[in-house]
Every structure is written in structure tokens, then in C-alpha cells.
């Protein structure tokens, strides 16, 4: 049985082909970007010369919940084209005891095999392993009972290939989540005061002249309401004035309505930061963070920044994604939501559902009710293919990255 082979294409991309079940199990942490605990993992095989995508993970369910979980996993996977599926069950749910002579979670494995078989997408392999660790023994749920020993997942061809391209595999999902933690809480507080001052000094929103609504318009145009209401509009995300701007710190968010002159200035701020990032400079002063927070609160500018995710995973998109990550770590709430949703969108587009989910949750923690974050989180929870989101950036004018 062959194990793993690699090819380098004309464009320099490296293709790793895996045919050994043990090597495939060892690839799971790299495909998820972290080492999972007890889980059921589905790997979708698109066919010859097509990547393994998506990779869907779920906690191991109680036996009474297995039918519902199997149905949801099937529904999520069938949203993506594919030729076959590999099921990997890792460990055991706490308290689970396999009947004598049966493998752990045998019922779940066979439910999945039956459901996918009935749908016309066969399960190529259904595998169990106590944990993903070099030397662990894996077994197969199929009647043709294959078995073997896992290689060290840190020393496989796939691990080496990912290391050469700068991709990191983390020890746990919690370790990935810590990437988004604030860099310096004292600095966050300092920048929050600076943002407060900037918002206080911002002109009130122009009062709309709508017949019969003068009192309401005056209220909406007051400086206090400008601070405490998100009332702008966006090609992607229309906001309503009833949506609260601040959820945690007792202060208003940066206004999200700006004129053409202000938007032009904000675009210049973002372009300058992206140009520095392309040059390898991610050192952001307090003034830089505040300026970028104000710029990204301009929804016209925020929406144009969605275009930096294209082409997904390419160097320019990777640079922009790192800038959004730095801003998530350095920006106070609720303005932090805007770089967080840009980070999540970029991660989603390149297929990193774990980071995308964490980023959208981060945005919603900073700004509950953030509509774009809610929309994208729903798309992700329903396993919509990343390419279906391209229309969000396709409808925006690009040109933010330096040539």
C-alpha cells in the first residue's frame, strides 16, 4: 500500500497525495489546524487531483443523539461536491462503553456509512483511533478490517510541507483561540480613551430632511445619538438606528456614517497600513490603531476591505489577514468587531473554518448583533462552501493592496 507522494506544479504549489489510512488519520490535525480531542471528523474527497475539503469535526454525541448528529453531518457535507468520504472517530465520549466485541462508537460509524451510502457518496474509510499520536493503533469499522499504527503526525510529509509554507498546527482549539487575545490590556484601555476623545470630537450626523419627522431627525442627529447608534448603511450590511452601538464598556462606537471626503481619508489610512504590512511592518502605534479603528467603522471602507481576501491563501491575502489579526488583538470593543469580521471572512474564504468561527464569535462578543458577523457565522454553521461567499467581495471595488 502506498503511503504519501508529493508533486510540485508549474505554479510552485506542492500537492501531497495520501492513500494510506494511517497517514490520513495523522493528517487530521494539519487539516483542522489543531489537534482534536474526542471527536468525529469527516474528510470530503473531491476526486483525483482535488483537495480534501471540507473537513468537518463534531463532538462525539450521546447514543440517543447519534441519529440527529449523523443527519446534520450528512446535510453539511452534501452541500459540497465530492466523490467519497472518510470518517475518523477519535477516542471515546466520556462514559461511553463499547459492547463486548464491538469497536467504540460502532453505532455512529455505521449510521454515517449507511447515510452516506444511501446518498450516493460512499464512505471510503471508517476509522477509529484512541488518539492522534505516533504509535497509536488504528482500526477500521468496515468488514474488511484494516488496522495499523499511526506515524508521528509531526514528522509526516504533509507536516514538513506545511512547515515549509509557514502553516502552523496548534496543540488544541484553545491554543488557536488565544491568538485573538488582547496583546496588552493597559494599552487597550489607553486606546479606548483615545477613541472616546475622537468620537466626542466627531461632528453630529447631518439631520435628514424628511417631511413630518423633524423631531425624530433632530434626535438622530444629536452628538449623543451619533455616539450611541449605528445608523450607517453598507452594500453588504445595512444598519438600523435601533441597533445599540456599545454593549460592554458604557460608551458609544465610532460613527459608521461618513461623507465622501472622510471615506477617502479612511481608505488612505487603510492603504498605508496594508502597504506597511506588505513590507513586513506590523508595528502599530496607539495612533495607528485608533485611526484604523475609525477607518474600519466606515462601512464603505470596511466592505472594500473584504476584497483583500482574494485570491484566498495567496501572499497578499495572507498579509492582510495578519493585519486584521493584529488589529483584533489591539483594538478596544466595540470597534474590534470590524477587524474581527474581516479576519473571519479571510479565514473562511481560504477554508480555515476554525479560525473563522473564533473570529466571528470574537466580533459578536465585541458587538452583539453585528449583522455581517451574524450572517457569516450562520453561513459557516451551515457549512456553506467558501466560494459561495465570493460575491460579497466581488461586488466591492478593490485596489487596496499595493501593486
Image (tube, grey):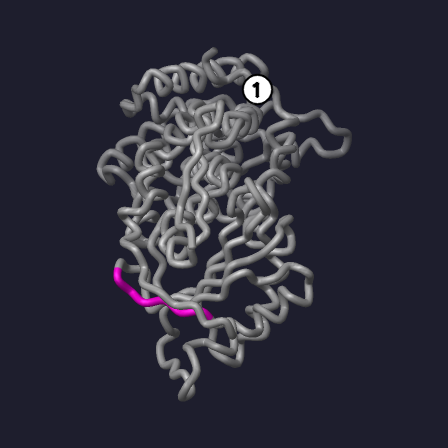
The quadrant of the picture occupied by the N terminus is: bottom left
Secondary structure under the numbered disc 1 in the rendered image: loop
Image side of residue 183 versus residue 359, left or right:
left
Q: Is residue 252 visible in this depiction of the protein? A: no
Image side of residue 71 versus residue 109, left or right:
right
Which residue is outermost to the front? Answer: 1
Of the pair 9 and 259, the residue shown nearer to us: 9
What secondary structure is the stretch in magenta mostly built from?
strand
Q: Is residue 256 visible in this depiction of the protein? A: yes
Of the pair 316 and 335, the residue shown nearer to us: 316
Which quadrant holds residue 251? top left
Count of all numbered marks drawn on residues in the image? 1
Q: Is residue 179 in the magenta section?
A: no
Check the image and report above or below for 290 versus 139. Answer: above
Query: How far across and down, in percent of the image, does residue 167 sit?
Result: 35, 37
Image side of residue 225 versus residue 191, left or right:
right
Identified at 39% across, 44% down, the residue is: 250
Identified at 52% across, 32% down, the residue is: 226
Which residue is outermost to the right? Answer: 211
Of the pair 42 and 178, the residue shown nearer to us: 42
Q: Which residue is mark 1?
A: 398
Query: How far across and down, in percent of the image, does residue 139 sit?
Result: 40, 69
Which residue is outermost to the bottom? Answer: 100
Query: How far across and down, in percent of the image, does residue 220 sit?
Result: 60, 34
Q: Which residues are the magenta region?
A: 135-140
Query: How far across and down, in percent of the image, does residue 248 sit?
Result: 40, 47
Identified at 55% across, 40% down, the residue is: 49
Amino acid at each position: 500500500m502506498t503511503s504519501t507522494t508529493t508533486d510540485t506544479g508549474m505554479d510552485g504549489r506542492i500537492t501531497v497525495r495520501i492513500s494510506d489510512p494511517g497517514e490520513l488519520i495523522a493528517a487530521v490535525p494539519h487539516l483542522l489546524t489543531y489537534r482534536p480531542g474526542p471527536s468525529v471528523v469527516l474528510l470530503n474527497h473531491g476526486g483525483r487531483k482535488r483537495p480534501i475539503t471540507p473537513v468537518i469535526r463534531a463532538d462525539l454525541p450521546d447514543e440517543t443523539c447519534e441519529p440527529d448528529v449523523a443527519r446534520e453531518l450528512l446535510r453539511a457535507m452534501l452541500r459540497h461536491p465530492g466523490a467519497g468520504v472518510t470518517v475518523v472517530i477519535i477516542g471515546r465520549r466520556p462514559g461511553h462503553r463499547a459492547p463486548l466485541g464491538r469497536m467504540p462508537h460502532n453505532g455512529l460509524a455505521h449510521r454515517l456509512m449507511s447515510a452516506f451510502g444511501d446518498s450516493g457518496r460512499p464512505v471510503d474509510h471508517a476509522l477509529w483511533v484512541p488518539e492522534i499520536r505516533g504509535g497509536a493503533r488504528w482500526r477500521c469499522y468496515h468488514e474488511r478490517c484494516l488496522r495499523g499504527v499511526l506515524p508521528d503526525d509531526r514528522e509526516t510529509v504533509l507536516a514538513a510541507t506545511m512547515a515549509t509554507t509557514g502553516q502552523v498546527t496548534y496543540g488544541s482549539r484553545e491554543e488557536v483561540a488565544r491568538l485573538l487575545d488582547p496583546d496588552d490590556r493597559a494599552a487597550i484601555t489607553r486606546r479606548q480613551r483615545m477613541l472616546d476623545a475622537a468620537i466626542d470630537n466627531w461632528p453630529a450626523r447631518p439631520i435628514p430632511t424628511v417631511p413630518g419627522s423633524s423631531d425624530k431627525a433632530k434626535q438622530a442627529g444629536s452628538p449623543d445619538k451619533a455616539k450611541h447608534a449605528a445608523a450607517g448603511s453598507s452594500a453588504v450590511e445595512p444598519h438600523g438606528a435601533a441597533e445599540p452601538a456599545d454593549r460592554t464598556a458604557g460608551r458609544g462606537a465610532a460613527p459608521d456614517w461618513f461623507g465622501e471626503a472622510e471615506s477617502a481619508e479612511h481608505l488612505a489610512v487603510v492603504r498605508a497600513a496594508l502597504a506597511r504590512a506588505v513590507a513586513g511592518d506590523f508595528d502599530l502605534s496607539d495612533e495607528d490603531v485608533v485611526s484604523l479603528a475609525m477607518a474600519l467603522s466606515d462601512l464603505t471602507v470596511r466592505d472594500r476591505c473584504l476584497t483583500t481576501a482574494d485570491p484566498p491563501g495567496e501572499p497578499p491575502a495572507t498579509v492582510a489577514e495578519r493585519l486584521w489579526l493584529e488589529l483584533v488583538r489591539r483594538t478596544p470593543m466595540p470597534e474590534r468587531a470590524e477587524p474581527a469580521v474581516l479576519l473571519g471572512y479571510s479565514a473562511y474564504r481560504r477554508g480555515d473554518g476554525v479560525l473563522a468561527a473564533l473570529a466571528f464569535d470574537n466580533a459578536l462578543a465585541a458587538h452583539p448583533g453585528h449583522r455581517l458577523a451574524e450572517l457569516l457565522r450562520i453561513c459557516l454553521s451551515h457549512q456553506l462552501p467558501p466560494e459561495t461567499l465570493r460575491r460579497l467581495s466581488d461586488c466591492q471595488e478593490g485596489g487596496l493592496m499595493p501593486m
